[in-house]
Amino acid sequence: MSESENLYTQSNLFIENREKLRLTGVKDVDNFAEDAISVQSQQGDLVIHGQDLKITKLDVESGELFVEGLISSFFYRENTTEKTSSFFGRLMK
């Protein structure tokens, strides 16, 4: 596996002072609101909860997501149903 392929299949989560979040390995954003963001990542679906959450950067080509706001919690959830399309995919239709 090449280094570029390895970077795309990895998923890393960085949080700075509960105010900034950086996630790599992002496939898509399913849902976004000021209090919750749902993301498809290489490691599964990730839900981020907080207050005044803002996506400051989303680049699915490089798999990066940057979020600012007060981050109160995050967790991975199991994929129980097949998604028909993402939030941004539905928005662009």
Image (cartoon, rainbow, N blue to C red):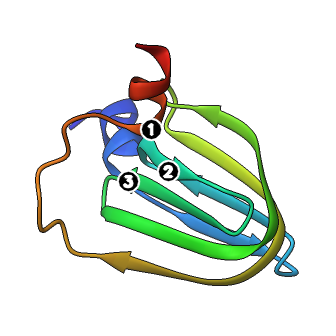
State the image coordinates of residue 85 (x, y, percent, origin top left). 28, 34
| Circle 1 residues within 10 Å: few <14, some 14–19, many ≥20 | some
In the image, what residue occupies the spot 37% across and 76% down?
76
| Front one among 66 and 88 | 88
State the image coordinates of residue 9 (x, y, percent, origin top left). 31, 47
Total numbered labels placed on residues in the image: 3
Q: Mark 3 and mark 2 in contact? Answer it, CB < 8 Å.
A: no
The quadrant the N terminus occupies is top left
Label 2, label 1: how far apart the Cα atoms are:
5 Å
Q: Going by the image, does 13 lie left or right of 93?
A: right
- Give the amino acid type for the residue marked by disc 1 in the picture: Phe
Among numbered discs 1 and 3, the one appearing first in the sequence? 3
- Give the amino acid type for the residue marked by disc 3 in the picture: Ser
Among numbered discs 2 and 1, the one appearing first in the sequence? 2
Q: Mark 2 and mark 1 in contact? Answer it, CB < 8 Å.
A: yes
Q: Going by the image, does 19 lie left or right of 22?
A: right
The residue under label 1 is: 87
- Give the amino acid type for the residue marked by disc 2 in the picture: Asn
In the image, what residue occupies the spot 88% across and 81% down?
17
The quadrant the C terminus occupies is top left
* Quadrant of the rendered image containing residue 46: bottom left
Task: From the image, state whether disc 3 or disc 2 is nearer to you.
Answer: 2
The residue under label 3 is: 41
In the image, what residue occupies the spot 48% across and 30% down?
88
Q: Going by the image, does 2 lie left or right of 16?
A: left
State the image coordinates of residue 34 (x, y, percent, origin top left). 74, 60
- Spot the residue most to the top: 93
| Circle 2 residues within 10 Å: few <14, some 14–19, many ≥20 | some
The residue under label 2 is: 31
Label 3, label 2: how far apart the Cα atoms are:
13 Å
